[in-house]
Image (tube, rainbow, N blue to C red):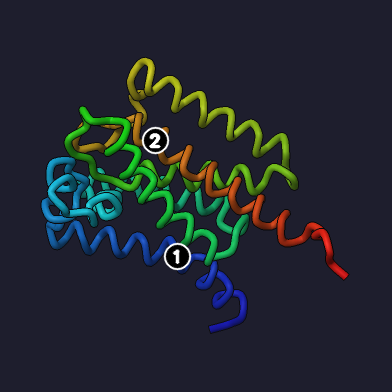
Amino acid sequence: MNVRAAALLRCCALPLQLSLLCALLQALHAAPLLRYQRGAILHGQYWRLLTGNFVHLGWGHLAHDLVGLWLIWALFGRALSTRTWLALLLWDGLAIGLGLLACSPSVHWYVGISAILYGLFTAGCLASLRARPWYAGLLLAGMLALIAWGNLHGPLAAEDWGMDGPVLPIAHLYGATGAALFMLARWSWGNWRTAPHAGAR
Protein backbone atom coordinates (compact mmCIF):
# COMPACT_ATOMS: atom_id res chain seq x y z
CA MET A 1 0.00 0.00 0.00
CA ASN A 2 1.47 3.35 -1.01
CA VAL A 3 1.60 6.40 1.25
CA ARG A 4 -1.34 8.14 -0.44
CA ALA A 5 -3.62 5.11 -0.11
CA ALA A 6 -2.63 4.68 3.54
CA ALA A 7 -3.41 8.34 4.26
CA LEU A 8 -6.81 8.00 2.55
CA LEU A 9 -7.60 4.89 4.58
CA ARG A 10 -6.72 6.66 7.83
CA CYS A 11 -8.87 9.64 6.87
CA CYS A 12 -11.87 7.45 6.09
CA ALA A 13 -11.45 4.97 8.93
CA LEU A 14 -14.11 6.48 11.20
CA PRO A 15 -16.97 6.73 8.66
CA LEU A 16 -16.05 3.29 7.32
CA GLN A 17 -16.18 1.75 10.81
CA LEU A 18 -19.43 3.56 11.54
CA SER A 19 -20.96 2.34 8.27
CA LEU A 20 -19.94 -1.23 9.03
CA LEU A 21 -21.31 -1.01 12.57
CA CYS A 22 -24.70 0.24 11.38
CA ALA A 23 -24.82 -2.40 8.64
CA LEU A 24 -23.96 -5.15 11.12
CA LEU A 25 -26.66 -4.02 13.54
CA GLN A 26 -29.16 -3.94 10.68
CA ALA A 27 -28.19 -7.44 9.56
CA LEU A 28 -28.60 -8.68 13.14
CA HIS A 29 -32.05 -7.05 13.43
CA ALA A 30 -30.86 -5.32 16.60
CA ALA A 31 -33.32 -2.41 16.49
CA PRO A 32 -35.81 -3.85 19.02
CA LEU A 33 -33.05 -4.17 21.63
CA LEU A 34 -31.18 -0.94 20.88
CA ARG A 35 -33.62 1.67 19.59
CA TYR A 36 -34.54 4.74 21.63
CA GLN A 37 -37.71 3.70 23.43
CA ARG A 38 -38.96 6.07 26.07
CA GLY A 39 -40.76 3.56 28.25
CA ALA A 40 -37.81 1.14 28.30
CA ILE A 41 -35.36 3.93 29.17
CA LEU A 42 -37.54 5.09 32.06
CA HIS A 43 -37.42 1.50 33.31
CA GLY A 44 -33.62 1.44 33.37
CA GLN A 45 -32.50 0.53 29.84
CA TYR A 46 -30.29 3.62 29.62
CA TRP A 47 -28.09 2.33 26.77
CA ARG A 48 -30.97 3.10 24.40
CA LEU A 49 -30.26 6.83 24.81
CA LEU A 50 -27.13 6.33 22.70
CA THR A 51 -27.63 3.12 20.75
CA GLY A 52 -30.90 4.21 19.16
CA ASN A 53 -28.85 6.42 16.85
CA PHE A 54 -27.08 3.44 15.27
CA VAL A 55 -30.00 1.19 14.32
CA HIS A 56 -32.41 1.81 11.44
CA LEU A 57 -35.90 0.96 10.22
CA GLY A 58 -34.62 -0.96 7.22
CA TRP A 59 -31.92 -1.11 4.57
CA GLY A 60 -33.44 1.82 2.67
CA HIS A 61 -33.28 4.00 5.78
CA LEU A 62 -29.70 2.89 6.43
CA ALA A 63 -28.62 3.58 2.81
CA HIS A 64 -30.19 7.04 2.97
CA ASP A 65 -28.26 7.89 6.14
CA LEU A 66 -24.95 6.44 4.95
CA VAL A 67 -25.08 8.50 1.76
CA GLY A 68 -25.44 11.55 4.01
CA LEU A 69 -22.56 10.43 6.22
CA TRP A 70 -20.13 10.07 3.33
CA LEU A 71 -21.19 13.37 1.76
CA ILE A 72 -20.56 15.16 5.06
CA TRP A 73 -17.21 13.42 5.41
CA ALA A 74 -16.22 14.51 1.90
CA LEU A 75 -17.01 18.10 2.86
CA PHE A 76 -15.58 18.24 6.37
CA GLY A 77 -13.66 15.06 7.17
CA ARG A 78 -10.36 16.91 7.56
CA ALA A 79 -11.81 19.81 9.57
CA LEU A 80 -11.30 18.01 12.91
CA SER A 81 -9.07 15.22 14.19
CA THR A 82 -10.36 11.64 14.25
CA ARG A 83 -10.33 11.71 18.06
CA THR A 84 -12.45 14.88 18.09
CA TRP A 85 -14.92 13.45 15.59
CA LEU A 86 -15.27 10.30 17.70
CA ALA A 87 -15.83 12.31 20.89
CA LEU A 88 -18.43 14.41 19.09
CA LEU A 89 -20.15 11.32 17.74
CA LEU A 90 -20.60 9.83 21.21
CA TRP A 91 -21.49 13.13 22.88
CA ASP A 92 -24.04 14.06 20.22
CA GLY A 93 -25.67 10.65 20.25
CA LEU A 94 -26.19 10.95 23.99
CA ALA A 95 -27.36 14.57 23.69
CA ILE A 96 -30.01 13.52 21.16
CA GLY A 97 -31.29 10.76 23.41
CA LEU A 98 -31.39 13.04 26.45
CA GLY A 99 -33.04 15.80 24.44
CA LEU A 100 -35.81 13.46 23.34
CA LEU A 101 -36.26 12.11 26.86
CA ALA A 102 -36.33 15.50 28.59
CA CYS A 103 -38.01 17.73 26.01
CA SER A 104 -40.08 15.47 23.73
CA PRO A 105 -42.25 13.22 25.91
CA SER A 106 -44.58 12.54 22.97
CA VAL A 107 -41.77 10.76 21.09
CA HIS A 108 -42.02 7.15 22.23
CA TRP A 109 -39.39 5.65 19.93
CA TYR A 110 -36.68 6.75 17.52
CA VAL A 111 -33.99 5.16 15.35
CA GLY A 112 -31.40 6.35 12.85
CA ILE A 113 -28.16 8.25 12.60
CA SER A 114 -29.61 11.24 10.75
CA ALA A 115 -29.72 13.46 13.85
CA ILE A 116 -26.04 12.76 14.47
CA LEU A 117 -25.38 13.67 10.83
CA TYR A 118 -26.89 17.09 11.49
CA GLY A 119 -24.49 17.35 14.41
CA LEU A 120 -21.50 16.36 12.31
CA PHE A 121 -22.51 18.87 9.64
CA THR A 122 -22.89 21.62 12.25
CA ALA A 123 -19.49 20.89 13.75
CA GLY A 124 -17.86 20.77 10.32
CA CYS A 125 -19.31 24.17 9.41
CA LEU A 126 -18.24 25.73 12.71
CA ALA A 127 -14.73 24.25 12.46
CA SER A 128 -14.39 25.68 8.93
CA LEU A 129 -15.71 29.18 9.65
CA ARG A 130 -12.32 30.78 10.19
CA ALA A 131 -10.70 29.32 7.06
CA ARG A 132 -13.75 29.54 4.74
CA PRO A 133 -16.27 31.90 6.38
CA TRP A 134 -18.60 32.44 3.40
CA TYR A 135 -18.65 28.79 2.37
CA ALA A 136 -19.14 27.42 5.88
CA GLY A 137 -21.52 30.20 6.86
CA LEU A 138 -23.83 29.65 3.89
CA LEU A 139 -23.89 25.88 4.47
CA LEU A 140 -24.66 26.42 8.14
CA ALA A 141 -27.43 28.90 7.37
CA GLY A 142 -28.94 26.48 4.85
CA MET A 143 -28.91 23.65 7.37
CA LEU A 144 -30.54 25.83 10.04
CA ALA A 145 -33.23 26.85 7.56
CA LEU A 146 -33.85 23.17 6.76
CA ILE A 147 -34.19 22.31 10.46
CA ALA A 148 -36.54 25.24 11.06
CA TRP A 149 -38.70 24.30 8.05
CA GLY A 150 -38.85 20.66 9.12
CA ASN A 151 -39.97 21.52 12.64
CA LEU A 152 -42.51 24.11 11.52
CA HIS A 153 -43.92 22.52 8.37
CA GLY A 154 -42.65 18.94 8.26
CA PRO A 155 -39.71 17.42 6.36
CA LEU A 156 -39.07 18.09 2.70
CA ALA A 157 -39.84 15.37 0.16
CA ALA A 158 -36.11 14.78 -0.40
CA GLU A 159 -35.66 13.91 3.27
CA ASP A 160 -38.25 11.14 2.94
CA TRP A 161 -36.57 9.57 -0.10
CA GLY A 162 -35.65 5.94 0.52
CA MET A 163 -37.02 6.01 4.07
CA ASP A 164 -38.98 3.18 5.63
CA GLY A 165 -40.85 5.40 8.09
CA PRO A 166 -41.43 8.99 9.25
CA VAL A 167 -38.68 11.59 9.68
CA LEU A 168 -38.36 13.21 13.14
CA PRO A 169 -37.18 16.82 12.62
CA ILE A 170 -36.99 17.60 16.35
CA ALA A 171 -34.18 15.03 16.68
CA HIS A 172 -32.25 16.91 13.99
CA LEU A 173 -32.57 20.06 16.10
CA TYR A 174 -31.16 18.22 19.13
CA GLY A 175 -28.30 16.87 17.01
CA ALA A 176 -27.31 20.31 15.72
CA THR A 177 -27.67 21.88 19.18
CA GLY A 178 -25.58 19.18 20.83
CA ALA A 179 -22.80 19.65 18.29
CA ALA A 180 -22.86 23.44 18.71
CA LEU A 181 -22.49 23.03 22.48
CA PHE A 182 -19.63 20.57 21.92
CA MET A 183 -17.78 23.02 19.68
CA LEU A 184 -18.41 25.89 22.11
CA ALA A 185 -16.97 23.83 24.96
CA ARG A 186 -13.99 22.86 22.78
CA TRP A 187 -13.24 26.47 21.89
CA SER A 188 -13.65 27.61 25.50
CA TRP A 189 -11.27 24.91 26.70
CA GLY A 190 -8.73 25.77 24.03
CA ASN A 191 -8.89 29.49 24.85
CA TRP A 192 -8.53 28.78 28.57
CA ARG A 193 -5.48 26.59 27.98
CA THR A 194 -3.71 29.17 25.82
CA ALA A 195 -4.67 32.28 27.81
CA PRO A 196 -2.13 33.68 30.31
CA HIS A 197 -3.27 32.95 33.85
CA ALA A 198 -2.96 35.24 36.83
CA GLY A 199 0.14 34.49 38.85
CA ALA A 200 1.90 32.70 35.98
CA ARG A 201 5.66 33.22 35.79
Q: Position of residue 27 (x, y in %)?
A: 16, 61
Name the residue furthest front.
Answer: 199
Question: In this rendering, which labeled residue sits more in front, label 2 or label 1?
Answer: 2
Residue designated by label 2 = 172
Q: Quadrant of residue 60?
A: top left
Name the residue furthest right.
Answer: 201
**Residue 83, placed above or below residue 43:** below
Density class for disc 1 (Cα within 10 Å; few <14, some 14-19, many ≥20) is: some
On the question of residue 160 being in view, the answer is no
Query: Residue at (40%, 46%) from the top-left corner?
Result: 116
Density class for disc 2 (Cα within 10 Å; few <14, some 14-19, many ≥20) is: many
Task: Report the front residue among 93 and 162.
Answer: 93
> In what element is the residue under mark 1?
helix
Mark 2: amino acid: His
Q: Position of residue 74 (x, y in %)?
A: 54, 53
On the question of residue 86 being in view, the answer is yes
Numbered mark located on residue 14 in the image: 1
Q: Quadrant of residue 80?
A: bottom right
Task: Report the front residue among 65 and 47.
Answer: 47
Sequence-wise, the earlier of marks 2 and 1 is: 1
Task: Report the front residue among 111 and 91.
Answer: 91
